[in-house]
Amino acid sequence: MTTPVDLRLRDPSPELLGLPWLTPLAEWTPDVVPLRDIPVGPSRHLVRFVALPDGLLAVKEAPGRIVRKEYDVLRALETRHMPAVRPMGMVLRSPEEEGLLLTRYLERSWQYRRLFMRLPLDATKQRGRLLAAMASLLVELHRSGVFWGDCSLANTLFMRDGQTLQAHLVDAETSEILPRLTDGQRQHDLDIVVENVAGGLIDIATRLGAEHAIDEMIEAAESVAETYRGLWHELHHDLVLRLDERWQVDSRLRRLRELGYAVDEVRLETVQGGGDRLRVKVAVAGHDYHAEELRRLTGLAAGEGQADVLLNDVRAFAGRLQPPEDDESAGRRWRREVYEPLGARATAVAGAHTDAIQAYCDFLEVRWLLSEQKGRDVGDEAALSALRARRTPVDSAASMSILEMPTGEMKPIVPGERDPDLT
């Protein structure tokens, strides 16, 4: 048996070190390796999932050059805090043999393709939100100099983040890290996304016997490009204003913060030959404005969407304090008196597959939805009961609640059982 050329493990636990790294992945058997069956849809390479004490590990077998490149790209994405799976290691065997890429399985996530197989074809609002999350992910990657090269329904995962959806990159085989992407490179990547998403949606419609919806699926795919261009423009365009219109700068900054972006610098310069006109350049920093503000006020580390929800709750709590307290004191008190006791109860009723912060966000939304329906504040107990019932307490489906999206991971397929997504 050939000795591995290179074995890199970022968390060298005894269970991880004990896996049969010299054996081809196809020969790993449940009696030797604690395998878990999780359907992944179409894939160029074999992927197996290993259940370790600290979570699931995804192991992909591919040519060594691909493994090395993808590992390096995923490490770079992790350094940039990009929404992507986290690399846990790699195995490079001899040049003649396949290598292995190890990534952490993204708990509480859903694959786009598998979810779209379950969504009704008329669920246009849900589909639109999911595709908008994909466009937002592509914007973030491009702003960090990342060319994806193969974004599709099969290699993108999403997770619930407060009342928003966060898409995550899974497959980085074709990705490149560059100092800066040109407009042509961005457009090329966007064209690939639209083509791949259209192909994926058309395939799903065909499998469901809904060929009449193909045109609608193509329009849905094209909406990714429209959303991308709108967000990119909002982040990068310059304002040209008269001196008496400087109030519009504050409006622009508010829009950026509502989108979750921190502003690094605002620069005002006169327009040559423009009389009293100013050009306003806004340097946008990371997509973590609300997350950083929540951390500052409460010490909690949350996703950007979750932080947006929690900050509203913190502000409402602070507004009720008499006498008023400074922001940080109110934030710490909110965490101690509100979030920790109610969050623990929300987590207990939401289930094991929902993290504590998301459970509290769900509780807040349920309480708001119930109160809107009843025309009064229904209180905590009614919201907890509704959350326990695992249903959105709204008679009308006029607005899409984040609670209509699935929680937790999908039920694994029993070995030998046909994947219902592929029927």
Image (spheres, rainbow, N blue to C red):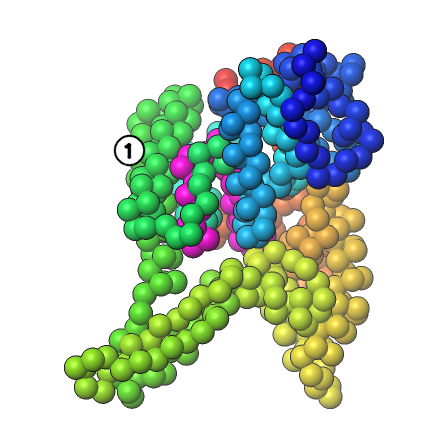
- Three-letter code, disc 1: Asp
Q: Is residue 183 above or below residue 34?
A: below
Residue reaching furthest to the left = 273
Q: Is residue 111 above or below residue 280?
A: above
Q: Position of residue 120 (x, y in %)?
A: 46, 34
Residue at left 34%, top 80%? Answer: 268
Residue at left 28%, top 46%? Answer: 184
Residue 109 figure quarter: top right
Residue 231 figure quarter: bottom left
The span shown in magenta is 142-171
Residue at left 67%, top 14%? Answer: 2
**Front residue (pair 390, 102):** 102
Q: Position of residue 158 (x, y in %)?
A: 54, 42
Q: Position of residue 194 (x, y in %)?
A: 34, 38
Image check: 265 left or right of 315? left
Residue reaching furthest to the right = 14
Tally the marks: 1
Residue at left 46%, top 53%? Answer: 144
Other-residue count near label 1 (Cα within 10 Å), few / some / many at <14 / 14–19 / ≥20: few
Residue 368 is a magenta residue:
no
Q: Position of residue 181 (x, y in %)?
A: 37, 50
Say which quadrant the N terminus sits in: top right
Q: Is residue 202 above or below residue 247?
A: above
Image check: 184 left or right of 143? left
Image check: 72 left or right of 334? left
Residue 314 in sight: yes
**Front residue (pair 181, 214):** 181
Residue 150 is a magenta residue:
yes
Please give the residue where the numbered disc 1 appears in the rendered image. 215
Residue 364 figure quarter: bottom right
| Secondary-structure class at tag 1 | helix
